[in-house]
Structures are given as structure tokens and as C-alpha cells.
Image (cartoon, helix red, strand yellow):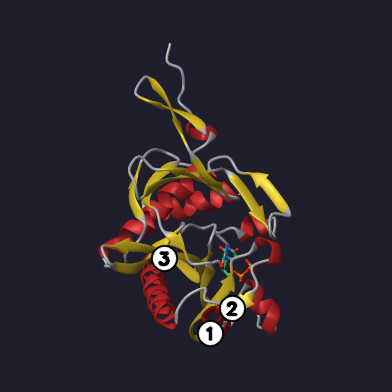
Amino acid sequence: MSLYWIGDKMARRKMLYEGKAKILYEGPEPGTIVQYFKDDATAFNAEKRSVIDGKGVLNNRLSEFFMTGLANIGVPTHFIRRLNMREQLCRSAEIVPLEVIVRNFAAGSMSKRLGIEEGTQLPRPIVEFSYKDDNLGDPLVPEEYIIAFGWATQQELDDIIAIALRVNDYMSGVMHGVGIKLIDFKIEIGRVWEGDFQRLIVADEISPDSCRLWDNETGQKLDKDVFRRDLGNLADAYSEVARRLGVMPNKPGNGSKPTLVN
Ligand code: UDP
């Protein structure tokens, strides 16, 4: 349980799950959850950690921006509305235990595994899957495993690939419009019930924590690699993405604290 305020009354709400970058609380109505974005940054399966002032606020706003944009082009997501600086109301969904990764250019684990130089354009967008298990380090898995172990059905997998490619087209286009190259990204997919029908929606978050974003001109990294590889201030990088998208003009955190007026 944690305490929070509704008007002038203190209320309790149930914490459902605490992850590395977010906390999930039970939502105000059945079928809803509240996602709270923390400032914590972790990398390399949480071996490297830090607190980045303002990161949670930025990711809350950026994820709202991308999820709303996706809904506008007909890609269903879990996002309902933003509640405040750090929280958003979402539909609760049963998360498919896969990290769905789409790559346009080689980077990260693909470059390492295949010896392809980072930034090399791929012949076409490639969708790949990791099995979500921190203890195992989220291993890359072939589709055969996913079906055989029942993590998703063949039909779901086909739908997941179609959703992932639509998200890729949307995200690539939006980013291109502000001079940023979408190298790769990760999404998570949830199942929701609508009457007797089950359908798949984009869940979790879409933010620079889960994308690789490079400036078109300079190649400057504007994503979590800034933290992973000690390339500078992470909140500055995320603020730059938010600024270009017109999401948030200023860096939140210390710089935006209210000042006392005498
Ligand atoms: N990614 C993520 N969470 C993970 C693993 C990867 O959000 O647990 C994102 C990562 O930020 C990148 C893309 O998925 O945008 C591909 O990551 P990659 O497989 O190259 O792994 P990494 O090099 O980050 O270990």
C-alpha cells in the first residue's frame, strides 16, 4: 500500500508491481492501472544504476505523446490519459512475456552478435523477440519457441508483427520529421478482453528508454545509450527529443522547481 492525496483526503492504493523504471498501482476503476514513472535509470540488467533527475517526468510525457499518436492512426494502446507529471492512467492488460524489438539500422546486441557496424542500414525492418526474464537476461528467442512454449499463439504472433511494423512506420516518420533517425526500439504487447473477444494492444511505455534515437546530422545519441555508455547527461538528451517534438519546452527537475515569490 502507498499513501496519496485525493483533494484533502489521504487515501491508500495498492501497489501491483515495482519495476526498474516504473511502479504500477491499482487504478481507480476495474480494468485500469496507474503507471508511475520513476527517475531511476538502469542498464545491463540493472548492474548499472543511477537516479536521473527529471527522467520520469520526461518519459511520462513522451510516452503519452507516442501512445496518443498511435491511437490516432488506429493502433490500439493501453494509454487512457495522463494524470499528473509522473503518472498516467492505463488499461490493465495481460502482458505477453516478450520484448518485441524492431530494427531499422544495426546497433547494440545485433551489431555485437553479427559483427555489423552500428548504424548500418538493414535491408528491411527486422522484428525480433526476446523472452522477458531478467534472471535469464531476456534471451533472444525464435518464433518456434514462442509457439511451442505457448507464450503467444501463431495468430497472435502474426498480429504482433503487424502492430510492431505499424509502430515502426509511425515512430520513424515522427522522428524523421524532427531530424532524428529511429535506429531500433522495443515495445511490449498486452492482451485485453472486449466482451468475448481478446485483442492485442501496445502496453508498457514508448520513450527514449526503449528506443535508439540518433540525430540525423551529427549522429548524436539521444537515448538511453547516453547512460549505458557514459556519453553525457541523459535528461538533457531526453529533453532535446521532447523539445523537438514540442512536448515539453524545458527540462524538468531542478531547473523547473517553483520559485518562492516574496
Ligand atoms: N531494449 C529495451 N529493453 C531491453 C532490451 C532492449 O528497451 O530490456 C531496447 C533498446 O533500448 C534498443 C532495442 O531495444 O532500443 C534493441 O536493444 P538491443 O537488443 O540492441 O539490446 P542492448 O544493446 O540494449 O542490450
- Chain-order first, disc 2 or disc 3: 2
Look at the numbered discs 1 and 2 and tell me whether their residues touch, using CB distance below 8 Å.
yes
Query: Does any atom of ligand 1 lie closer than 8 Å to the CB of label 2?
Result: no
Mark 3 lies on residue: 175
Look at the numbered discs 2 and 3 and tell me whether their residues touch, using CB distance below 8 Å.
no
Instruction: Give the percent coordinates (x, y) of residue 208.
Output: 51, 58
Q: Look at the picture and state if 198 lies above or below 87.
A: below
Q: Residue at x 52, y 73 (%)?
A: 151
Q: Residue at x 60, y 50 (%)?
A: 20
Q: Quadrant of ligand 1?
A: bottom right
Going by the image, does 174 lie left or right of 15?
Answer: left
**Residue ranking furthest to the top:** 262
Disc 2 secondary structure class? loop
Q: Residue at x 52, y 36 (%)?
A: 253
Q: Residues within 10 Å of mark 3 (few under 14, many from 20)?
A: many
Q: Mark number for residue 122?
A: 1
